[in-house]
Amino acid sequence: MPKMKSHRRALKTYKVTATGKIKRHKAFRSHILTSKSAKRKRQLRKATVVSKTEAYKVRRFLLA
């Protein structure tokens, strides 16, 4: 049986931290930025941790 391939898009999108959590970038920062406040755009710059329920699915993509 051939090896399982990891999901290529998931490998480029998510990063695993040293403690095993999964980091992701936030959405809503690609266009129509004039209607969004500077505070909102500044907070969208930062990466965040994937929730526990979604992390299970993402980890299956990454470690397949």
Image (tube, helix red, strand yellow):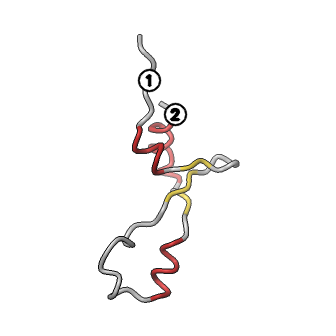
At which x and y percent is residue 29?
Answer: 39, 72
Q: Mark 1 points at which residue?
A: 4
Q: In this view, does 39 lie to the left or right of 28?
A: right
Q: Residues within 10 Å of mark 1 (few under 14, many from 20)?
A: few
Q: Residues within 10 Å of mark 2 (few under 14, many from 20)?
A: few
- Between 51 and 3, the one nearer to me in the picture: 3
At which x and y percent is residue 59?
Answer: 51, 41
- Between 24 and 56, the one nearer to me in the picture: 24
Q: What residue appears at the point 30 percent right and 80 percent down from the top-left corner?
A: 32
In the figure, 58 relative to 2: above or below?
below
Q: In this view, does 15 lie to the left or right of 8?
A: right
Mark 2 or mark 1, which is nearer the start of the sequence? Answer: 1
Q: Quadrant of residue 8?
A: top left
Q: Is residue 15 left or right of residue 17?
A: left
Q: What residue appears at the point 47 percent right and 37 percent down from the top-left corner?
A: 60
Q: Is residue 2 left or right of residue 35?
A: right
Q: Which amino acid does label 1 sit on?
A: Met
Q: Name the residue under label 2.
A: 63
Q: What residue type is labelled 2?
A: Leu
Number of dots carrying numbers = 2
Instruction: Say if mark 1 contacts mark 2, CB within 8 Å.
Output: no
Give the Cα distance between marks 1 and 2. Answer: 9 Å
At which x and y percent is residue 2?
Answer: 42, 14
